[in-house]
Image (tube, helix red, strand yellow):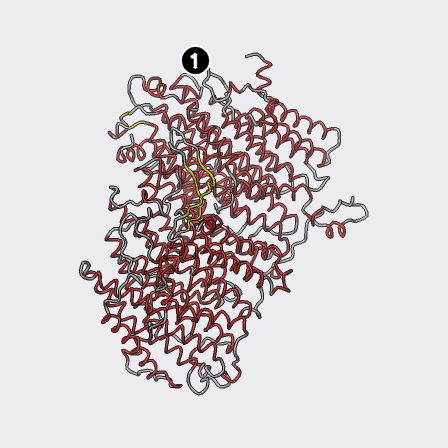
Amino acid sequence: MNFWVSLDQWAFLVPLLPALAFVIIGALGERLSKLEHGGWLAVLFSAGSMVLGFLIAIGEMLGPGTYVDVRYTWFSIPPSSTGFRDGFSLVMGTLVDPISALMLIVVTLVGFVVMLYSIGYMHRDTGLPRYYAILSLFLTAMLGVVLADNLLMFFLFWELVGVCSYFLIGFYYAKPSAASAAKEAFIVTRVGDVLFLAGIFIYFAMYASADPSWAASGFLFTKGNAAFLPLGQGVNPTLLTIAGIFLLAGAAGKSAQFPLDAWLPDAMEGPTTVSALIHAATMVAAGVYLLVIGSLFLGFTSTDQLAIVAVGGFTTIWAASMACVHTDIKRVIAYSTVSQLGYMVLAVGAGFAMVGLFHLYTHAMFKALLFLAAGSVIHAVTTQDLFKMGGLRKKMRYTAFAFLAGAFALSGIPPFGGFWSKDDILSSVYSQLGTHPEYWPFYLMALATVFLTAYYIFRVYFLAFEGPSSREPGLSEHAHESPWVMRVPMLVLAGMAIVAGLLVFIPPFATLFNPTLTSPAFPVALPLNVPPSYPLVDIELSALSVALAVGGILVAWWLWGNGRLASMPRSAPARWMRETLLQRYYVKAAYDWIGGVGVYSIARASDFVDRFVIDGTVRGFERSFAGISQRMRKIQTGVVSDYAAYVITGLIAVFVIVLFVAPWLVSRLGGG
Amino acid sequence: MSLVTTLLDFLPEILLLAGALLVFLVDALGLRRIEVVGSIAVVTILLALLFVFADLGFAPVAFLAAIPPGQIDVFPPAGSTPLYWFTSLGLFFQTFFLLAAFLVALASMSRPSRERGAAVFYGLILLATLGMMLVAVASDLIFLLIAIEVVSIPSYLLVAYTRRDTRSMEAAMKFFIVGALSTVLSFFGASFLYGAYGTTNLFVLASGSAIANGAAGGGGFPLLVVIGYSLLIAGLAFKITLVPFHAWAVDVYDGAPDDVSAFLAGGTKKIGLFAFFLVFLGPVLFAKVAFQWFGGIGPVSFGPVLQVLLSILAVVTMSVGNVLALMQKSMKRMLAYSSISQAGYMLIGVAIGTAPALTGASLQVFAHVFMKSGAFLVVAAAAGLGVGPLIADWRGLGQKRPWLSAAFALMLLSLAGMPLTVGFVSKFVLFSAAIEAQGYFVWLAVAGLLNSALSVFYYGRVLKVIYFDSPAAAPAVPAPEGASPAASGAAAGPDHTPTAPLALGGLGYARAATIAIVAIVIVVLGIYPGPLLQPLAAAAQHFIRLGL
């Protein structure tokens, strides 16, 4: 057993290997053209990272459930009498525990298969060194988020993840829509990140005042240290609630939860591989991971929990409804991702962090699979419009099989992966309805979404793969199956989509989902609720959700199956509804308006104030006092006297502040 | 104190003076090649740096120390009112100033060998550096203000030394007029304080008893003191470009020759911050006697009032600087506004007045010396390569000059406070100190972070232009003479002394080396800041203890 524990000391290598790939590919660039422009290097290093990640995860299963925290002090401020009485350190560390082990499996596996798939998929593109370098850097950042043992390090890598996502969405930067989507994603997630940081501040300020020695030992929380769990420590509950809401905002930005959801469908402007890895399996799940950590190690108040449940529950149906009408194959899957992330957030909010994590894990497999299969289709027919496709099953058997496996998993048909985790979420939330009747509406939304989910994904399947031939003539005739570098990743993920849920019934694997309650990390009893400890008592509930899913599939078949193209209902309300959904409930238009009119006009106004009001006032004074003619103004350099006027204005302002404003403020603030 | 010990105390300053005189002498003798005067300046600065290091107790050169270690960071004898006093924080600032001068002096050696005014340039740099060194050891208000003048007068001249460009002449004129106004305000403020206390010694001014007894004369409102400090704030704010005393800086940094801008933004500006430390940290820490203010407000003591004022100035400065930087199309004006906003971050340290905050501000000064001088030096290098003044002119430089672009990107990332750069460390220390100080100071950190987030946009825009925009669209700007090997070869007519083509594709060894040094420092201290952070934090603690 010692071998496995000693392995945890080397956990830092897991993110470091892709970082090396980033440095090498970045430095050598086009000189690597023989190695698929660095692609094979990226595959190699991500494979190394995956092997080590899996070994660490196996060690964690056999451990079982050890907590190994390896810390390095980056820099520290020495103690002083005026501030930081006990000093202050910025610590970088890796923590291997059941949760991070599970995430290691997800991130390294999906990372590796997507890298491999990219070799075939991206082959025809230019700028590949940039692609592989940034994708490798993304893996580093994501693994850094997974392994971080404190919130500050978590935040730094979290930001790096966002930067990589920005560059990859805008990979086809010459395309205006891609560039604007990248910018949109960056700005929207930044809104969440700023709030997240504010939340970190509040935790920091709360703890620093409660225990000064705390700052000395590291920054913020250490996962696995019970002393930092604030519940029952007499921390101000209002502050705790606000901090929790801020954390939720950060998670909502990253995980595209309502109302910060608009960026994710637009992020599909990036290559499909990027959508699979970043915008389905890993980065967008980081928000859920943050909430899991928050609920396990920082603690949420019941108000926070309700907010999280509301955001998650509403997002499921909000995004799923939009997925039902879109005709771009990638956008439908993107809306589906938003909706599924809503399920995870819902579970975490209801107090079932591990259940949310369970769905994160199965979802990562089948959603990455769906994207890779969609990519394979796009690769073959060079269009993303579902209404042009059709009949592709005969030409692309592997792809059709892979997509079907993913679709069943997403719909929640037993025994596919998605069934276990989604059903687990629904029954777990259901079990809370007695004590929390306010969860009812959100539970019902999540339940209804099961039907919608099955409908929209099988709509995609029938439109793309079934029917005699493509609707646009010639499309399916020229289609061909993808090369093996793309088929193998799809088959691996298809296998996972089928068995991911069943794996949990293998006892060692199950330890990842059922951390030991006696460990110092979990001083409070956790409702785990993940198989095998989740006992499948609610057989009626499971039957209901499966029935809903089957119903969705049948409706999809009825409308779109066998090459049918459902004619649009002509009635005005139906058309209006369809248009509303296509326009995403007009939320994006509202954001654009706010962004365009609001922010831009602030910038314009400050420019105006600077140029005309201040300058103008100063010049106005000049004119009215001296009555200087235009000629005189030319002789005087004019501008200098403006600057001198600024100085005098500033001096007057200083006097006013010192003599009146500041004393008043101090007397109000009570610092005098 | 005998004359000898006094002279020994000022060994680095005397060296700088001697170097400046030597430069002018060599110029008079006709040896005005830039290699000669530049070498003299660089060697002088390095020697001075060596002595300052020795005084700081840096082990390998400790035997050179001219100041006995026992005379640093101690209180002056009771009853004495020294004009100058040695603190380790002051010595650290001396090294920062010397480093700024060193970077500019070294890089400028790559300018055309026979350029007019090279000796003037180097002589003035050395004289201004001498003044900066004096600022860092001042312990008397009048000594401090005169030292600032010793910096200011060469600075005015430096802006206009080329005497070619009407824009730089105009900038120098503005700089001089507004600077003179600020000087007047500062001395006027000092006279009020003298009227209140009967002394201008900073130790006396700083101590709380003086504010209570000397000024109030029995508990009344210390109007003289408050007016005096307000005038001083207005006067010194000019130096560190606090809004609204900033307007000159943009024109001057924009109009001055690029290397001079590097020196002004990276070097001389920082004396203002140390002057703020010297003058305002005392009242912030010790002015705790409460008075009844006008309008029946109070009783409130002067220290917290000053903290509020400095906080407001800090937030206004960083925000206005950043917002205006967002809208600039010219690279140098963008850097100038970014420099203004950085002054706002630094001021946070004075406003809070704890040792960690002071450490953060000092670290920010150090980082800024490298980031901002480096950035302006790269701008100078790019101008030499035929890149125009607008940000848009930098299109596609990433492909044409990968190393230069990478170094510049590093400097911009450091200015934005990205991790693994020294700019991150300094902002981290500064903002965490603000959060730790609690109260409304937390909002200073919040404002600082929001501003940092905002600044990412304009730095990022430059990076996008450099790396992602295609170079084809950039208009071909004819390279100035001697800028690139091809251009200088073609331009060399029969009666034109052929200029030696510059090494490293037009950059020149000296400038390339300087930029490399800056990049290495930014990364190395970004990854491993301990060796600088630890002693600097200790120095800041001593400084606070002295209450200067």
Classify B37 as above or below A107: above
A577 relative position to A482: left or right: left
- State left or right for residue B478 relative to residue A70: right
The answer to which of A641 and B246 lies nearer the viewer is B246
Residue corresponding to mark 1: B78
Would you place residue B71 above or below residue A109 in this image?
Answer: above
Residue B27 seen: yes
Secondary structure, mark 1, is loop
Q: Where's the C terminus of chain A, which quadrant?
A: top left
Rendered view: A575 above or below B213: below
Which of the chains bears the disc numbered 1?
B
Alpha-carbon neighbours of circle 1 within 10 Å: few (<14), some, or many (≥20)? few
Q: Residue furthest right?
A: B494
State the residue at coordinates (53%, 20%): B69
Image quadrant where residue B253 sits: top right
In this picture, residue A272 sits left or right of residue B374:
left
Amino acid type indicated by mark 1: Ala
Q: Position of residue A251 (x, y in %)?
A: 36, 56
Q: Where is residue B298 in the image (x, y as percent from the top left)?
A: 26, 29
